[in-house]
Image (cartoon, rainbow, N blue to C red):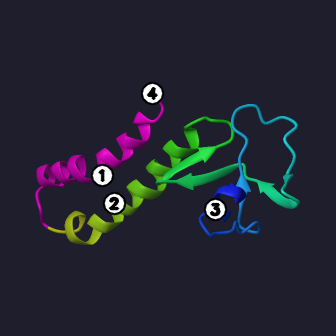
Amino acid sequence: MADEAASLGLEVNWQKTKIQALGRTEGVPLTVIVKDHEVAVAEQFVYLCSVIHSSVQSTLGINRHSAIIASAAMQSLDNQIWRSRVSMSTKLKLYNTCVLPIVLRGSALEL
């Protein structure tokens, strides 16, 4: 990585660089030495709104989508829709259109 970056006139910021071991994580050290630099081993990180965990299970990503993102969608509709005089059938249609796809997208990762 450092050699490729150098060929482009860039350099790696080793203080911000982390690596992740996927799959079997028993015995993985907390830090690894790369090119005489100590690099931390990350257990999880967020990439494109999905949690990538070293155990390669998608449970954390599903929980994140369900809890955080769907909750934000519900809150954004809270003041305008849920507390208004809009009919219950319209509220349900909005829920099925705006909130449910967010929750189901997280569930599709499990398949």
- Which numbered marker is on residue 84? none
Which amino acid type corresponds to the residue marked 4 in the rendered image?
Leu
Tell me which numbered mark, 2 or 1, is placed earlier along the sequence.
2
Q: Residue tagged by mark 4?
A: 111
- Distance CA(mark 1)–CA(mark 4): 20 Å
Q: Which residue is mark 1?
A: 99
Q: Secondary structure at mark 1?
A: helix
In the image, the segment drawn in magenta is: 85-111
Q: Nearer the viewer, mark 3 or mark 2?
A: 3
Q: What is the CA distance from the residue labelled 2 to the residue labelled 4?
A: 24 Å
What percent of the width, then of the height, locates residue 102? 35, 48
Can you identify the residue that label 3 sits on?
A: 7
Asked whether the beta carbons under mark 2 and mark 1 sit within 8 Å of each other, the answer is yes
Question: Rounded to the nearest whole Å, what is the CA distance between mark 4 and mark 3?
Answer: 41 Å
- The residue under label 2 is 73
* Residue 82 falls left or right of residue 3: left
Residue furthest to the top in view is 111
Q: Nearer the viewer, mark 4 or mark 3?
A: 3
**Alpha carbons under labels 3 and 1: distance apart:** 46 Å
| Mark 3 → mark 2, Cα distance in angstroms | 44 Å
- Please tell me which residue is depicted at 30% across the width and 52% down the height of the picture: 99
In this rendered view, identify the residue nearer to me: 98 or 43.
43
Element assignment for label 2: helix
Secondary structure beneath dot 4 equals loop
